[in-house]
Amino acid sequence: MVIFKVFSLLGGLAMFLYGMNVMGDGLKKLGGGKFENILGRLTSSPVRGVLLGALVTAVIQSSSATTVMVVGFVNSGIMQLSQAVGIIMGANVGTTITSWILSLSGIEGDSFWINLVKPVNFTPVLAFIGIIISMAAKSEKKKNLGSILIGFAVLMFGMETMSDAVEPLKNVPSFTNILVMFKNPILGVLAGAIMTAIIQSSSASVGILQALCSTGAVTYGAAVPIIMGQNIGTCATALISCIGAGKNAKRTAMVHLYFNVIGTLLFLILFYLLHAIVKFDFINNAAAAVDIAVIHSVFNIFATLVLLPFNKLLEKLAKLTIREGASIDAFAKLDERFLNMPTIAINQSHTLAVNMAYIAKEAYELAVECMVKYDSEKDKKIMENEAMADKYEDALGSYLVRISSKDLTEEESRRVSLYLHAIGDIEQISDYSANILHNARNKNEKDMHFSEKAINEMTVMSDAVNEIMDKLIVAFSGAEPQEVECIAPLESVIDRLKRHLKKAHIRRIREGKCTVDTGFVFTDYITILEKISDHCANIAGAMMDLNENSFDVHHYMGEIVETPEYKRLYSEYSEKYALPVSK
């Protein structure tokens, strides 16, 4: 009965889509975020952009995923709109590899080697190997390889199921009549666009069309407009993803749409014009799966070659459609599109966490200056930085928690944990800078004055804290990761400074050289400085322990003090930040 064939078709489609999803996820994880990082590299050459887009899409098997990545990159300011145009074109070319893989199912012949490359014969073996690897492997890379093999096998099995389900329909007149309708270019384009927009995958919709070819009812005349429509329908994913995004992200999605619409119009006009002149005899012939792959590839290569020289015009057309709006703010880097691309999402979080550290560092420097000489403008800037650090913590904390709910590799999970801990410590540093400012205000309002010796001591300690923050930031940013080894010995020197300074100031109060009020301000100040260095050490400890697959800061501090390098650095910093000789 036909109804059961329809059930088989739906089941085959489900397996096809699921297999494609599993295989794509496995490929991306196996790459360890390299594909996303490659796309994120800026290039001013449209040709290189095309090659880059084609390569990445061919590997991850999804032009929609590539385009959504690019929309996210543009929205967050990683990539300029002009750089995105070539990658979008390349993504359309790269997605054609899927149709060529699927066309293997149509290979005919009695030769052993010909039969060996038919998916129906080798995919069961791949599935068996894949499940063995997934069950037995301990490393994530091997498990991802197993997922790729299983996903591919399920995909091809779904393709075979769809082909088997629709093959009997070639004898059903109502079915063949429907396909004949799609010879009308407008109907064919609409059908392809709607089908692709619904299932959100041009590769899948092309695969369905290839499966329908087994009925013998899909002619070239019907296939050409449907394929054109499928390329337009795939734009739906990017258009949906740019909702609520910045103007340039929306422009990127529009470039994708205009490229496919203009390419379709040009291709169809040329195709039917030539048909009117020379009469293509093959137009009413049945198309095979490999013919669909050929048409799909020819169209996308044709559109890219024709429109690539006019990439600036596509960009201008998108700008005319989407007018100027608000500029991108810092938090646009935390784009929701990246949540399904953890490596990019984590990298973006890291970038903002480093920015947050610089904001906290600036607040600290200004607060120290206010302790020496109060300035209302610096006061205002410190409070602005402290408020901004709070916003960073809220935005980053929420985003990192959402990332942590995704399917992460072990390394990605460690990085998320590090950044969650780090932003808390950085926010505390900005709070302590505000506390220093409070002391500076109190000192200014009461017209307090420190002795020259107290000022010199405070300068020694604040300089040491300034250095520990500098070393932490360059290590945390990744610019000079080896600097993290300097944090622990310098923090120990700062601890010792606090103890000595407290004792020295108590002695001055007893001797009547300082007032009690001044003593409170002094003591509070050096206590805050020591706490800032503690937070720097917390982050450094987390950085070093995470490299050892653990998260025990006390373990880190306990182990490192025994090393010769620690003792050498401790001696060096003790000499550098030696207190003035007491009189």
Image (cartoon, rainbow, N blue to C red):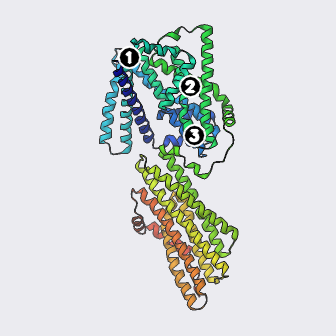
The amino acid beneath tag 1 is: Glu
Q: Which of marks 1 and 2 is nearer the N terminus?
A: 1
Residue 205 locus on image (x, y percent): 47, 26
Q: Name the residue under label 2.
A: 300
- The mark closer to the camera, 1 or 2, is 1
Q: Name the residue under label 1.
A: 167
Residue 269 locus on image (x, y percent): 63, 17
Q: Earlier in the sequence, mark 2 or mark 3?
A: 3
Extreme residue toward the bottom, this view:
511
| Distance from the alpha carbon under mark 2 to that under mark 3 | 23 Å
Q: What's the residue at 53%, 63% (across, down)?
A: 426
The amino acid beneath tag 3 is: Cys
Element class at badge 2: helix
Q: Tell me the quadrant of the picture where the C terminus can be found.
A: bottom right
From what the image shows, is residue 4 above or below residue 448?
A: above
Locate residue 183 relative to residue 265 in the image: left or right: left
Element class at badge 3: loop
- The mark closer to the camera, 2 or 3, is 3
Mark 3 touches mark 1? (CB < 8 Å): no
Q: What's the residue at 66%, 38% (across, down)?
A: 322
Q: What's the residue at 46%, 66% (across, down)?
A: 565
Query: Which numbered tag is attached to residue 242?
Result: 3
Is residue 48 in view from this perspective? Answer: no
